[in-house]
Structure formats: structure tokens, C-alpha cells
Image (tube, helix red, strand yellow):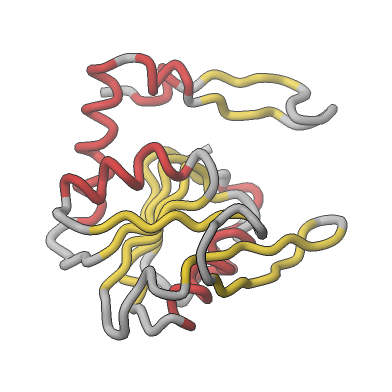
Amino acid sequence: MDFKLYVRDIEDFPSKGITFKDITPLLKDAGALQQTTKALLELVGDAKVDKVVGMESRGFFFASLLASQLNAGFVPVRKQGKLPGDTIGQTYALEYGSDTLEVHKDAILEGERVLVHDDVLATGGTAKATCELVERLGGVVVQCNFLIELDFLRGREKISNYQVRSLLNY
């Protein structure tokens, strides 16, 4: 299946000069959604996974589907102040400033094997911060798994210590 047929470019979103990769056409097509989930699972291979971590917010779509198919738990990583329980946070650099991601302190147990998933790997800051959160909780990152990788932003370099798999490259 040519998954790129289900990803449309939106020019100048969220700001001028940015071309946004919109996955909503893929999400609304039941067959494409099922085939994408299957293809993302194939990227995982036979790795044992206890938890799938998805990053806010578009990473939640496939992370929860992957968790279900892998018989693993789903763990949301959210922006600061969005989770209700006791959390730990990880601050990371943005082009202009910084941001903080948080996860519940009890979300991942020592030694659990974790698949980190997001919809897009861009500059790698969010993925790196998420991997650091997983490791601070005692988890082991078995793979960083992405629907889309924007190669020209070189985000893979920030997470080169981990196995990185992407379904689509631009």
C-alpha cells in the first residue's frame, strides 16, 4: 500500500513557510488505518514490548493501537500540567525557547521494555525527551517508532543511541 497517498501537505501551517504533513486522510479511511497499524507493527518485529509510549497528541492515535496489538499497556506523555497524577518532567530545547513533557511516575516499572511512538520525527527533541523520561523511570527503550520521518531535519541524530524505525520518509 502506498501510504503517502493518504498524507496531504498543508502549506503555511502552523506558520508561514511550514509544510504540515496531515495524516487525517489516513485516519478516516478504515482500510488505510488498519494497513498502517499492521505496517507499524512489522517495524517492531518480534521485540518484546511491555508498554507503548505515545507523545501528545498525534502520537496517541497509533500508540494505543500498537499497544492493543502488542498486548502491552499504553502510556501517554503529555505537555506540562496535563496529567492529573504525580508526574516527572523532562525539559527540552525548541528552536526558540523550551518545552516540558511529563509522564506519570508509576507509568513504567523498572526493567519494562518500552516502544516509543510518535506520528512524526522532525528535529528529535520530543523523542529524545520522551526516551529520557522512560529511562528515568527505569524502562528500557526497545525502539523509537514513527509514522513519518522528515529526513531533512535530521532528528534521527538526536536519538541515534536507540533503534529508530519509520514507515514513511520525506
| Left or right: where 99 falls relative to 28 | right
Whether residue 4 is situated above or below residue 78 in the rendered picture: above
Residue 53: name its quadrant: bottom left
Image location (x, y in percent) of residue 158: 59, 68
Between 43 and 49, the one lying in front of the other is 49
| Left or right: where 126 falls relative to 55 | right
| Left or right: where 79 falls relative to 43 | right
Between 125 and 77, the one lying in front of the other is 77
In percent of the image, x 87 and y 56: which residue is there? Answer: 96
Which quadrant does the N terminus fall into?
A: top left
Whether residue 81 is situated above or below residue 152 in the rendered picture: below
In percent of the image, x 20 and y 37: which residue is there? Answer: 38
Residue 113: name its quadrant: bottom left
Between 31 and 152, the one lying in front of the other is 31
Image location (x, y in percent) of residue 80: 66, 59
Image location (x, y in percent) of residue 167: 36, 42
In percent of the image, x 38 and y 58: which residue is there? Answer: 75
In percent of the image, x 21 and y 65: which residue is there? Answer: 49
